[in-house]
Image (cartoon, rainbow, N blue to C red):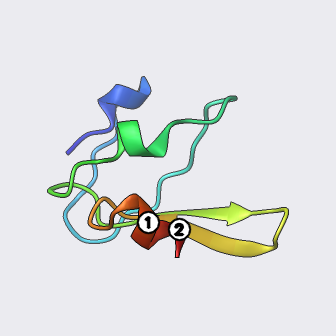
Amino acid sequence: MSASSFGVTIDVVKVWNLLGNSETSAIDVVTRLNDTSKVVTVWKWNKASSKWAFYTPNMTAPELAT
């Protein structure tokens, strides 16, 4: 998989990869990373609550909200 949809090409391997969002505006994680064959989880630091939040395409919106 390469991250060319982000405007750059980054080769990632099937294991564990840490990629940062270098865009100046927020991205729609569901639209960009909703491929269960390529994405397991997406993590972000929620500064307002001082906690980690995550998204996974394997869970429904209600499951994620819980």
Q: Residue furthest front?
A: 62
The amino acid at mark 2 is Ala
Determine the image quadrant of residue 38: bottom left
The image position of residue 39, as x and y in percent, is 28, 58
Instruction: Find out whether the residues at labels 2 and 1 contact each other: C-beta distance under 8 Å.
Output: yes
Q: Is residue 43 above or below residue 11?
A: below
Which residue corresponds to mark 1? 62
Determine the image quadrant of residue 48: bottom right
The amino acid at mark 1 is Pro
At 81% from the left and 73% from the top, the residue drawn is: 50
Which residue corresponds to mark 2? 65
Determine the image quadrant of residue 62: bottom left
The image position of residue 42, as x and y in percent, is 45, 61
Classify residue 59 as left or right of residue 44.
left
> Dot 1 surroundings within 10 Å: few (below 14), some, or many (20 or more)?
few
At 46% from the left and 44% from the top, the residue drawn is: 29
Task: Name the element at disc 1.
Answer: helix
Classify residue 36 as left or right of residue 32.
left
Q: Where the N terminus falls, by quadrant?
A: top left
The image position of residue 8, as x and y in percent, is 41, 27
At 41% from the left and 72% from the top, the residue drawn is: 63
At 29% from the left and 66% from the top, the residue drawn is: 40
Q: Residue furthest right?
A: 48
Classify residue 58 as left or right of residue 37.
right
Between 57 and 25, the residue placed more toward the observer is 57
Q: Residue furthest left?
A: 37
Task: Name the element at disc 2.
Answer: helix
